[in-house]
Image: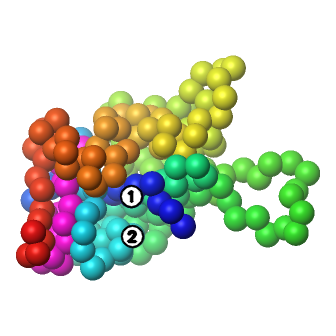
Amino acid sequence: MDVGYQSMLVVAEAEPVCGILRRLDQQALVAPAGPGLTAVVPGRGDWLPIELAEKFSRQLRTASLYWAVDEPTWVEAKVFDQGEGAHRYSSHPILRYEELPPEPLEPLGAETGPFAPFGTDRLDEAALLRALRGEPAREGEPKPPPRQQHRLIVEALGLDPALLTADFDHALARAAEFPGAVHVSTTLD
């Protein structure tokens, strides 16, 4: 699977998130994403990003959200609560048919409730549901490609999508654009 980028949101302040990354010797760019929310774009390290999301949730006893976006195909997400998998989302559900079904399948887990803890006071539930379903932002527009769909989801949560929709190298190159951003480096850096 060729993943275009992966990112995470943690319902916590940045300092304890950075502490976990340092203990794990995991490179990442970390920045405040909203009140009580921290964005993480993982870089080099021994841990898979989805494992990091689980660790943040378990060690901080909070919720975390893992995103993976494959440019041509899909958006995937997994919500963790207190370290346990609480919800899974896939914009392109796995087909279990030998032939394509007569009607397109709905995205898996396209529900707004599990994503609410990651929103701000500007959360737009109707826009979030449209984005999770892969519907265009405006009537008459084509279905958004995965990166744009993820952008629409993040915007519906009331967050700035710039950091959460970037791969590590691009995020690091633009770190100065993200207020409060911290580059957590590894012992190999």
Q: Secondary structure at mark 1?
A: strand
- Mark linked to residue 50: 2
Please say whether residue 63 is one of the residues in the magenta stretch: no
Label 2 with label 1: CB-CB less than 8 Å: yes
Q: Identify the residue shown where x is 11% and y is 75%.
A: 188
Q: List x then y, in percent, for residue 147.
A: 48, 43
For residue 134, say whether it is visible.
yes
**Magenta segment, which residues?**
16-33
Q: Identify the residue shown where x is 40% and y is 55%.
A: 5
* Left or right of residue 83: residue 12: left
Kindly report which numbered mark, 2 or 1, lies closer to the viewer in this rendering: 1
Front-lying residue, 103 or 42: 42
- Asked if residue 26 is positioned above or below residue 149 in the image, the reply reads below
Quadrant where the C terminus lies? bottom left
Please say whether residue 21 is one of the residues in the magenta stretch: yes
Amino acid identity at mark 2: Ile
- Asked if residue 19 is positioned above or below residue 66 in the image, the reply reads below
Provide the residue designation for mark 1: 6
Q: List x then y, in percent, for residue 160.
A: 31, 35
Front-lying residue, 157 or 168: 168
